[in-house]
Image (cartoon, grey):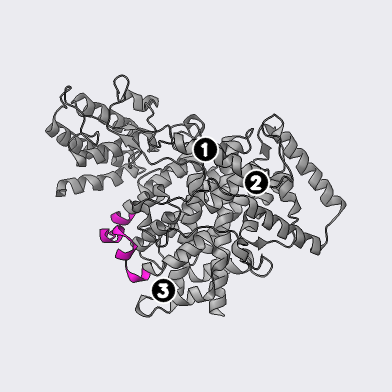
Amino acid sequence: MDAQDQETLGRWDGLASRDAGSRAAAMEHIRQEVMRKAEAIGPVPPSSPPPACGSPPSSDLNAVLAHLLMLTKRCPFEDVRERCLRLLQTVQDLGVRIPRPLGNGPSRFIPEKEILQVSKVDTRTQSIFEDAFAALGRLDNISLVMGFHPQYLESFLRTQHYLLQMDGPLSLHYRHYVGIMAAARHQCSYLVNLHVNDFLQVGGDPKWLNGLDGAPRKLQQLGELNKILAHRPWLLTKEHIEGLLKAEEHSWSLAELIHAVVLLTHYHSLASFTFGCGIMPEIHCDGGHTFRPPSLGHYCVCDIANGNSHHDSPFGGQVRATASRQGLKRQTERLPTPYVVQEACGGEVEVLMERMKQLQECRDDEEASQEEMATRFEREKTESMLVVTAEDEEWVPSRDISRHFEDPSYGYKDFSRRGEHVPTFRVQDYSWEDHGYSLVNRLYPDVGQMLDEKFQMAYNLTYNTMATHKDVDTSMLRRAIWNYIHCMFGIRYDDYDYGEINQLLDRSFKIYIKTMVCSPEKTTKRMYESFWRQFQHSEKVHVNLLLMEARMQAELLYALRAITRYMT
């Protein structure tokens, strides 16, 4: 790539300016460069077959055109969207093949029309989107789906921006590489690809991307912590921490380790959200667009504006979908039957609301003894092991993903498999509020506060609605979901009656929760659709926010407790 191309790439940053004049100047420079390249190529002869990759001859121009396509759909500034659309039309008029989107919107699970459109948002959400675009030069699909809940999105983006871009113990390229390692543990190619690009943009060594063995020894040593936190955090000990802090010339400082732990838990849990919401590849990334003409009719740039992308799914999932249905049937047959919500027929929401009302009345009438509460926790923990995740067969990660971590066969295992016993983690002995928060804040200032706000935002977020019902107190349901996730990790709240979980969470919901939290790469659209069928997509996204944050806090509790034990 020549110097002129490098200068053109630098102009993309100008499109994120809040000043319209600066955006116009940057866009004009990009337009001139694109036209220079397009005119040099000339038209593609109508009789010539498409290249093997389905792309025009210039790979440099391909990347630029794909980026323009992304901006027509994802830029929060209307003037930039319109100029990019006109530029693509001009390029097409020259006879140069332009890209078109693959897929229908940011999610495979949620119809595009139900996700907040960039051009149709309120003032507050518009400001949040503009801030995100200015920080990263993109408005990613995760942010668009989280846009159902602007309050949470604002907290999430603020925290993520601080972790990745503000002052901190780890260098910028280390941060993105840790993100790659964490996302790769769950085979999350969406997050891996995003951070591979970010890693290179901040000056990361491309050789590190050939595999973990090409990275510095210091990062390689983080691999053991990465896999334990991702899959079996209850096995983490102070000896693991000591091994990282006393590794001679490759050792980590306490502050660096806290930064790394927060990044690992952030991206493990974000992988859960990504799979749980069926997040699609970004338009400008692999799998998000194609240069192949649609099979029927002529593709015009106007289709981009109208949302007619002639959907060609990049996921050839018919065989997998059939296997998923069979797997789901097998799972359902194996589960205990304490309570089944009326799913197939109507009244699901009303049944759940009635259960909540009855449980509240029981709370008011009687209070179980501490012994009974402990027994109910152990019973629920045992039953959670009987909830199996998705298909039974082993998943083999692709080489592109698995090269970023070691021991690909290492995955989630239930506490009692092969007689393994893990002591219950009592929150009364070590909690986020009383212990973890202050440790993080001391070693990585302000981050403890940001994480706490994000946890609270997800936990307390409510619109007092359930489906079409208004003025509903959903706190009991939110607490049941949060505590069930922590229960799966062996974490117990002494003041919570775990008998409520079986009354509020049905079997299909438990399958979804356990799969998304423990083996998110196995989450399917059928599983997403099988729980809370009468609820809105925005409510299911809220559930996924709860699952993500509860998982992150559970991992953090185990990691921070191990660090505390090492320090004392």
Element at label 3: loop
From where the camera sits, is residue 401 visible? yes
Asked whether 204 falls inside the magenta stretch, the response is: yes
Lower position in the chain sequence, tag 1 or tag 3: 3
Q: Is residue 508 left or right of residue 58?
A: right
Q: Which residue is labeled 1 in the image?
A: 525
Give 40 or 178, whichever is nearer the viewer.
178
Q: Position of residue 376 (x, y in %)?
A: 75, 57
Alpha carbon distance from label 2 to label 1: 21 Å
Task: Please name which of the two marks, 2 or 1, marks the residue nearer to the observer.
Answer: 2
Q: Is residue 380 above or below residue 330?
A: below
**Residue at 61% of width from left, 54% of height from top?**
456
Residue at image point 49% right, 71% down? 443
Q: From this viewpoint, which residue is outermost toward the top?
A: 297
| Image quadrant containing the C terminus | bottom right
Disc 1/disc 3 C-alpha distance (Å): 41 Å
Which-is-in-front pick, marks 2 and 3?
2
Q: In this picture, which residue range is highlighted in magenta?
A: 198-219
Q: Which residue is mark 2?
A: 334
Residue 162 pos. (x, y %): 44, 58
Compared to 236, does 271 lie above or below?
Answer: above
| Residue at (35% x, 39% y) in the render | 287
Q: Separation of disc 2 and disc 3 at Cα?
A: 45 Å
**Residue that extends furthest to the left in the rendered view of this protein:** 40
Dot placed on the residue nearer the N-terminal end, 2 or 3 = 3
Q: Are marks 2 and 1 in contact (CB under 8 Å)?
A: no
